[in-house]
Image (cartoon, rainbow, N blue to C red):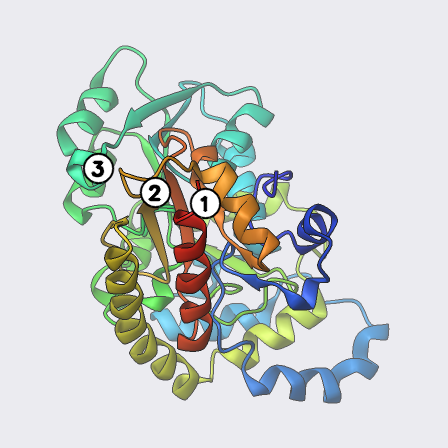
Amino acid sequence: MLERYGHGGDLVTASDLFGITADEFVDFSSNMNPFGPPEVVLHVLETKWRELDRYPDPAVRGLRSKLAQRHGIKPDHILCGNGAAELIDLAIRALRPNQGVGLAVPCFGEYADAAHKYGGSVVKVPMFEEDSFRLSAERVLEAASGYDRPGIWMLGSPNNPTGVTVDRDLVLQLLDTGAFVVIDEAFLDFVPNEEAITLIQEATRRPNLLVIRSMTKFYAIPGVRLGYAVGSEETIAQMRGQQTPWSVSSLAQWIGEAVLDEEAYAHRTQRWLAEERAWLTNALGALGCKVFDSITNYLLIKLPDESAIEAAQLQQLMGQRGVLIRDASHFEGLNGRFIRVAVKLRELNERLIQALSECLQQR
């Protein structure tokens, strides 16, 4: 199983399974910007390496200041972390909900893992294929007002693996119930009009709202591990009190500050994605796949009804061809008919379509 450790992008496991070196794979199982890290990352590595004999800034002041300027908020509303995964964990650890954690499934597995790690229960609101996996306000608000109502809601916007955002009005209604709401906006940078969608400004004004952002997906630096959370000063202080000292390395801080200035890189990525996502969606549809609408850089796909192949078998056949896909049946609420793929550059997307066409024709 490629998702041995719960995620895509595990090239070591893939090499063990398929006998192919990591460099030979085209990895559609993880959702990174295919342009790779901005050039400025190399400049940072070349010019700052001698400073690695110093401790990192424990308060991450330089990066927090740049993020605050970017979002028009105060640095005290920001906590930087070792990727969004650490911040999800810190949110649960700091808030310790007595009434459990509310999730809209299918969703990122780290939400439930964090809740269970600290002894919390999980309340699940299902999203259905017939609704294009959009979150029903009626179902959420019913769960939010019930006897077992959650103390915290953790919602992806865009959601992983569906690529759909949560309706802003629904989030505000949840906040009005008194619940604490954590919005994971890890992939929102890929959306050109993110300013109209993000709840970062709202999170500085609402004591029961926290927004989590990742910097690793958009800037293609997952090996660096970097993300940040925005919330009330009180919530941020609570999370900081639970955080391991020097959680954000010097390299992560330097690179984070540098990439925030890469506006041309950001605009290029957003222009490319709008065109390439449409091309890939059409190409997958031509193979008989059902592709669900996504506003970000990955697509949830249902395999053709006439094909007997299941996601796990397809993942094996594709892996043997050097193409890695995500078996989406590992997301709760999805069955063996679903896969997830990243959107990559045209040449690589063509390779995906060719390999997928060959595999779907096998009996």
Q: Position of residue 303 (x, y in %)?
A: 33, 43
Q: Quadrant of residue 156?
A: top left
Tell me the mark number nearer the camera, choosing from 3 and 2.
3
At mark 3, the secondary structure is loop
Q: Quadrant of the C terminus?
A: top left
The residue depicted at 64 percent of the width and 51 percent of the height is: 10
Disc 2, disc 1: CB below 8 Å? yes
Tell which of 38 and 350 is nearer to you.
350
Tell me the mark number nearer the camera, choosing from 1 and 3.
3
Q: In which quarter of the image is the N terminus?
A: top right
Q: Name the residue under label 1.
A: 234
Rendered position, 271 above or below 344: below
Q: Name the residue under label 3.
A: 135
Identity, as a three-letter code, of the amino acid under mark 2: Pro
Identity, as a three-letter code, of the amino acid under mark 1: Glu
As drawn, is 235 to the left or to the right of 56?
left
Identity, as a three-letter code, of the amino acid under mark 3: Leu
The residue lying furthest to the front in this view is 363
Q: Quadrant of residue 177?
A: top left
Tell which of 265 and 175 is nearer to you.
265
Cα separation between marks 2 and 1: 8 Å
Q: Mark 2 points at which residue?
A: 207
At mark 1, the secondary structure is helix
Q: Earlier in the sequence, mark 3 or mark 2?
A: 3
As drawn, is 21 to the left or to the right of 200?
right
Q: Position of residue 211 (x, y in %)?
A: 38, 51
Q: Where is residue 336 in the image (x, y as percent from the top left)?
A: 41, 32
Rendered position, 50 above or below 123: below
Tell which of 190 and 314 is nearer to you.
314
Dot 3 crowding, Cα within 10 Å, few <14, some 14–19, many 20+: many
Q: Earlier in the sequence, mark 2 or mark 1?
A: 2
Disc 1, disc 3: CB below 8 Å? no
